[in-house]
Amino acid sequence: NAGVTQTPKFQVLKTGQSMTLQCAQDMNHEYMSWYRQDPGMGLRLIHYSVGAGITDQGEVPNGYNVSRSTTEDFPLRLLSAAPSQTSVYFCASSLDRATYGYTFGSGTRLTVV
Amino acid sequence: RKEVEQDPGPFNVPEGATVAFNCTYSNSASQSFFWYRQDCRKEPKLLMSVYSSGNEDGRFTAQLNRASQYISLLIRDSKLSDSATYLCVVRGGGADGLTFGKGTHLIIQP
């Protein structure tokens, strides 16, 4: 049981480049979400999904897109990378966001130069 | 608007001591409460849920005070391995209902 798997672990992008951060879970969790964590800011929600085919915006969605074609996968796309998107990105999943805690992936450290 | 507030610390505590820290939340309609632990450069991991009656898990005790809107975490007989950042998490107020505090940094000293 792998839990939540994120790839890549590290990435350096040039300003204006696009890329996709991958997230997959094998726990049959309906709820998945993406957070970014910056020093002094705590975890901030980017996008979330309550099930396949359903996504919604979080606190800081600008510059990011998501899709949820399957229960297992929830990729995060950076459309045109900016230095302000330099951060650590965490994907998380939960059986039920109301009751259960989240299981986090190990994170992707992104640097935009 | 600071929805979940924590003292960032650091709390420097000798090994074996008892340490407690609190978290306050602003949304009185909040329904679920959690403590997470995050080690340096690692992902957050669920430490324990917090129930209205209070709950204990080994050396860790969590308390919820709905009237005053705060949550506490008590660690007894602290170990070096307890050194980490502890995140207070509340359901209610955020876009998806879960709001994270910025964390309290705990350092256990030998």
Image (cartoon, helix red, strand yellow):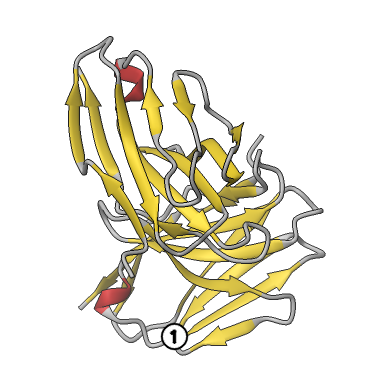
Residue A77 appearing in the image: yes
Report the number of numbered marks. 1
Residue situated in front as seen by the camera: A16 or A41: A16
The structure residue drawn at horizontal position 30% and vertical position 81%, both measured from the top left corner, is B79
Quadrant location, the C terminus of chain B: bottom left
Measuring from the top left, give residue A71's x and y in whole percent.
50, 50
The residue that appears at 28% across and 9% down in the rendered structure is A16
Give the vertical position of A36 relative to A1 (above or below).
above
Question: Which kind of residue does numbered mark 1 sit on?
Answer: Arg
* Quadrant of the rendered image containing residue A82: top left
Viewer-closest of A88 and A70: A70
Residue A19 position within the rendered picture, expressed as x and y whole percent measured from the top left: 29, 24
Residue B17 as seen in the image, left or right of residue B50? left
Q: Residue at x 51, y 77 (%)?
A: B74
Question: In this rendering, is residue B2 above or below B106?
Answer: above
Q: Nearer the viewer, residue A81 or B8?
A: A81
B101 to B65, vertically: above or below: above
Q: Point out the residue furthest to the top here.
A: A16
The residue closer to the viewer here, A22 or B108, is: A22
Q: Which corner quadrant of the image does residue A41 belong to?
A: top left
Q: Chain of mark 1?
A: B
Question: Is residue B30 rendered to the left or right of residue A113?
Answer: right
Instruction: Report which residue position mark 1 lands on.
Output: B76
The answer to which quarter of the image holds residue A101 is: bottom right
Residue shown at the point (22%, 27%) measured from the top left = A111
Q: Residue furthest front?
A: A70
From what the image shows, is residue A79 above or below residue B69?
above
In which quadrant will I find the N terminus of chain B?
top right
Measuring from the top left, give residue B60's x and y in whole percent.
49, 82
